Image (tube, helix red, strand yellow):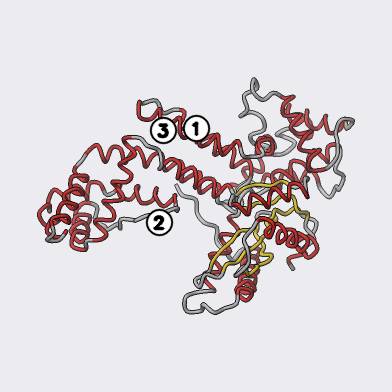
Amino acid sequence: RTRQITEHKMATYQCDGWKNVVKTSVITSMMTVDSLPYLLCTHDMTGKSKTGDKLFNLVKDNIVYMESTYGVNMIMITTDDGPDGKKMRHLHAATYPHIAMFVCWAHQSGLLTGNYLAIKSPFMTSAARAIEVIKWFNNHQRALDLLHSQQLCTTGHILALILPVVMRWTGYYCALKQLHSQSSSIMGCVAANKQQLLVAAGAMSDLKAKALEVIMICCDEQFWNDLAKIVSHLKLLAILANILQDPACCLDHVLLTLMRNFCFFETLHSTNDTFIQKMMHVSLEHQWAKADQELFILAVFFNPYIWACCFNPEKITQFDLFHMVHRVYQWLFHQSIHSDFNFTAAFEDYYSDLGQFSSDSMYLSGFEAEYHAGGHEIDFTGIWKKLCGANTVQTGRSGFVKLAIWILTMVPNSAGTECVFSTFGLTHTKTCNQINPQKVHNATLVRMNRRHTHIDAGLIPQCKKRK
């Protein structure tokens, strides 16, 4: 059944490592076709070396299996940025130079948040102080009871204080946002119950000193102002992480989101914010420097609703875009367009919003209304496919269209694999911890196949968008 769906389509390949509850190490590979993930292979790595050469051989075998079993055309590989992943990408770039290689941008977005929290600025100390407040209340039941009573009086409902897990950077936004939202309840609790909170801390002097420190933090108005600023910054980084860890994330999403974050930090002008601005710009530019920039730029260009209007024509001219198209086409398709007049004409028509590639001819406003009426995201690849039809020619106008489809199909993260690991955890539990990794793989394969069947039948409701 899967081959009937995927045959002759473009697929992106992802792989990542995972350990189950009994610390069995596995490497799982997946492919994404038409924004849907399909499980490929799971390799038990217990007792085996985790090296780039080993991973390269596994990936090479998986690609052969993927293309022969499912009949797909593999166009890119995504892995994390660990030492084995780096060497594997280096070896594949030398062996298969026509295949695009990406680091997982879901992981890179987490690094941006980690870099922000590591900035040494006076107001950033409030983030660490906030974590101390959360820990203290959660570790003292009497203090927590007093806080819950104050929450009922202030807001009418109880909300927990969340302690973020180390290295789960988006969790810091959730934790600090929750704490800030309860600022009135916390300050009211401290003002009304200071002596009871000191008693709840314990009889020892160091415990009372810690309680007094927490009370002073909660009474500090500057602490809450700094926390509000940190939450506003982390909110943008959390949005970036949610976008980049979507299994259907595309290259244009990455560039536009990075650009939005860069512009946000560009607007910070206060004395303390200038240092934050500089450090975050350095972090964003560092991540961008490691990327295949032309692919990301062309992904935005081939988004028919954006086109070239977001580029500064003094920095990226029409000729710059044409040369990018030429280089990427020659790289991916192993053909030159120097003598292909129809390809050049197609580029000029699309850039100038003329002919077959005009907004009216591509029916962009109509597609936008149809997708929004159905509650779906606009399928840019689907729009381009309607221009291509069943044509298999890779030159001329058809070649230009196929290049757009090729680039917009790429998924620059391994989020699908991470979702599979979560499904593995539903099968391989603490009470069923002796299941062989291959059996877990097979059970997950059946589970995913049933889910795809239910999606096709319209039995799985669409998640509502947040307002």
Q: Image height check: is 191 above or below 148? A: above
User: Position of 228 compared to 306: left or right?
Assistant: left
Q: Position of residue 48 (x, y in %)?
A: 63, 67
Residue situated in front as seen by the camera: 196 or 395 = 196
Return the disc, 3 or 1, that comes first in the chain's sequence. 3
Q: Position of residue 206 (x, y in %)?
A: 16, 55
Q: Amino acid at mark 3?
A: Ile
Q: Residue at x 58, y 55 (%)?
A: 415
Q: Image height check: is 407 above or below 155? A: above
Disc 3 secondary structure class: helix
The residue positioned farthest toward the left in the image shown: 195
Identify the residue position indicated by label 3 in the image: 276
Quadrant containing the N terminus is: bottom right
Q: Image height check: is 268 above or below 20? A: above
Q: Residue at x 46, y 44 (%)?
A: 113
Q: Position of residue 389 (x, y in %)?
A: 81, 48
Q: Which mark is residue 258?
A: none
Tell whether label 2 touches label 1 (CB within 8 Å): no
Disc 1 secondary structure class: helix
Disc 2 secondary structure class: loop
Q: Position of residue 388 (x, y in %)?
A: 80, 44
Give neighbour class at mark 1: few <14, some 14-19, many 20+ (Cα, 10 Å).
Answer: some
Return the disc, 2 or 3, that comes first in the chain's sequence. 2
User: Position of 46 compared to 266: left or right?
Assistant: right
Identify the residue position indicated by label 2 in the image: 165
Can residue 374 be seen here? The reply is: no
Identify the residue position indicated by label 1 in the image: 281
